[in-house]
Amino acid sequence: MVVLDEWLFLAESTNEHFVPCCSARFYHSYLTLLMAAAAVLRTPATRSLLLLAARTFLRTGRNLSTNPPPPQTPTALSAELLRLLSAAPAWTPDLVRAVSSTLSTASVPDVVVSVLRSLRNPSLAGPFFLLASSASSPQPLPPDAYNAVLPLLSYDPAALEKVLEEMSLLGYGLPNPACAALVATLVRSRRLEDAFRAIGAMRRLKFRPAFSAYTVLIGALADARQPERALELLRQMQEVGYEVSVPLFTTLVRALAREGRMEVALTLVDEVKGSCLEPDIVLYNVCIDCFGKAGNVDVAWKFFHELRAQGLRPDDVSYTSMIWVLCKAGRLGEAEELFGQMEVERDVPCAYAYNTMIMGYGSAARFDDAYRLLERLRERGCIPSVVSFNSILTCLGKKRKVDEALSLLDIMKKDAKPNTSTYNIVIDMLCMAGRVNEAYKIRDEMELAGLFPNLLTVNIMVDRLCKAKQLEEAHRIFESASQRGCNPDSVTYCSLMDGLGKKGKIDEAYRLFEKMLDAGHNANPVVYTSLIRNFFMHGRKEDGHKIFKEMIRRGCHPDLTLINTYMDCVFKVGEVERGRAIFEDIKSYGFLPDVRSYSILIHGLTKAGQARETSNIFQAMTQQGFALDARAYNAVIDGLCKSGKVDKAYEVLEEMKLKHVSPTVATYGSIVDGLAKIDRLDEAYMLFEEAKSKGIELNVVLYSSLIDGFGKVGRIDEAYLILEEMMKKGLTPNFYTWNCLIDALVKAEEINEALICFQSMKEMKCPPNTYTYSILINGLCRVQKYNKAFVFWQDMQKQGLTPNVVTYTTMISGLAKVGNITDACSLFERFKTNGGVPDSASFNALIEGMSNANRATEAYHVFEEARQRGCRVNVTTCISLLDALNKSECLEQAAVVGAVLSEIAKSQHASRSL
């Protein structure tokens, strides 16, 4: 503290009268110490005082001299420095010595700006500047030098941090042009992380970054699908006093909505309306489009009506966006009404709105209405454009109406000349339909029309042929593309690789991948996604993991789709902890988990028997404002039902309906199954009827859940009625359906009916599985039809099915009970040889059977094995064995069994006393 007081006294004493009294040596020493003290002090007031003293010293002490060697002229020195820097590819120790030697011969500040402005290798700017700053000490470099170096430091983040710290220490301001240039350079080179850190460093050092630096980076982050960081910067802008404009809010709203962060986007819109800013037509149009695309049709409608209430007139974009939102939601009546309003208000037809309405009719398969709208366009004096026809052709392709599309192509030629997109649409649907020869004819017609097939045409043909499983034809198109002047790109390679992978030709796909790299194409995340998915799909998970690591090694940054796919694959092969780790790592790759990420996590944990975490994950999704789609809701509902929280699943179903997300057959199936498993069958049946009333196409899984539920509580007649209804709808029962029914019949001791079902199952070409045979063998043994059970056992072996532990135990017990000890022992040994681990029931059945067959010694050996394995031998078994050993006069062994029996009796007495 004493030292600090002395320094403050000296600083306060430093003035214009004090400096001329100093010697040159003392002047430099004193100034250096002042600067060092200012650097270490943490209190802003004291640091400012010391810096003021240093600047006073600089201003009044410039004429003092330490008799340095005669300086070179600035021009000559600059030229020499530029020569040294231009000749060096990197900053090396030799270059440091050469530059230091040159700087020592002249006044440094005079040449630094000149060198920086002419420097051709920006990567050397940072180290050169810091060396020059050190050589200039104790006299700091002028502000112009710092302004000149800032835009060049985009290549050296570490140097940027040091330069900003020096500027802060010297009290220099941050010029807006230099700050904006620096951030713009980083954004242009797609180094958004470095740009974000640079602005963070500026704020940490109390600088005010340029307005344009913020807006450029916010726009880039929004485009890069990093809305959270963009929002953080917007809040920073408000903190430093900038007035944020409506267009910037609009950018953020669009970015957040695109990532499913609807609640946050809505909050921003409310913030605009609650401030002095006035929402413009662009903001409203973005809200209509974004919320409509997210399925929030009513919210989009609200914005459309609010737009009018604010005195704004809907433009073509407003009408077109709202009409498309309504069409996509299946609310064609409202779309038609709005379209009618637009026609009344517009003297000149809006071609975009007409095309949107035509597309809406086409998507709903109302092609007659689409054709009538084309006629109405003609009546209003407009010739339908190629876009109008392409809209209908696209919808016809989606509905697989190929012949109608070909007829429309002929009609189209009277009004509009088909373009490349037209021909590509038709080629696309022909390839998907497997009509390859006709696709070639259309391609030839395209060439005759002077529209030579482009790379998109090749990519469409290769992709669609692969999806139609015509790999040889796809490969021929791929090979002939170069001859037609269309060299395959990464999309072409990826389509063929994916086709080969899905066909199981993984090694061929990987060889094609290597060929793509050799051809000079960079592998993108889409290519790696295809390879990873196909390796996992065909049981080669280790290769799938290697591909992911190879991608990282090659410097390819994964996108969120790839990470989600990889996580899904990992969960599906049972690697639950690894799947969790991938989910946690999403943020480290610069992304935030989206709805699909959470859906995969819930689904993976549910399948692994960890469904209890579903509630917490769902709560996290809700808190983050995600707009859940049907797939996400289904994952949540399934997880809740499997964790026994059926009432909570019911609540989520109601929320789903309120948010206008239509429940699917999977939604109803999960809840029906959950209710059936806890014997709430009447509620399950009501939900089943509700699904039917909504026109949802029910599947075998849902019917089977009901059959299983009714069967387990003995309501066999109702189970039969549901099976009958299912078959009338043309659905074929699968092995799960039959197993549920057969199991119910066996438990009701309707064994003959169960055997009839088993026969029906085989007649309907549904092969019985291990579980089917286990149910029947168990049922037959329960009614003491052991010989019949053994026939099924042998039949099971002929079918190549491997019995499970329950089947073995049942059969061993059954054979032992009928005295067939030889077969029972043989089966017991075979079970162990095949890697099976006998349970207590197996040991007890075999010991008791052997004892009853007077094979006491063998029974005792099995008894000893049971005890060594830690299996419990029950009282009845011990009594049978003891009796057999006494009859055989095996007194020593009988004593052991008697002791065990005595211990069991004591244990039972003690437990009853408690």
Image: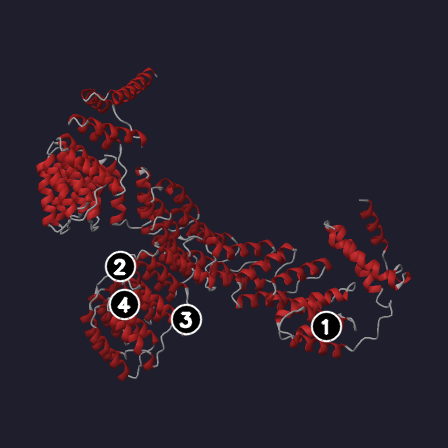
Q: Label 4 sits on what residue type?
A: Cys
Of marks 2 and 1, which one's residue comes earlier in the chain?
A: 1
**Residue occupying the point 18% across, 32% down:** 813
Of marks 4 and 3, which one's residue comes earlier in the chain?
A: 4
The alpha-carbon separation of the residues under discs 2 and 1 comes to 77 Å
The alpha-carbon separation of the residues under discs 3 and 2 comes to 48 Å
Measuring from the top left, give residue 523's x and y in whole percent.
Answer: 41, 67
Between 481 and 790, the one lying in front of the other is 790
Q: Is residue 754 left or right of residue 802?
A: left
Measuring from the top left, give residue 675's x and y in whole percent.
Answer: 25, 38
The residue at which mark 1 appears reads as: 98
Judge depth for marks 3 and 2 and give the one in front.
Answer: 3
The alpha-carbon separation of the residues under discs 4 and 1 comes to 63 Å
The residue at which mark 3 appears reads as: 517
**Residue occupying the point 72% across, 58% down:** 169
For residue 759, the mark is: none
The alpha-carbon separation of the residues under discs 4 and 3 comes to 21 Å
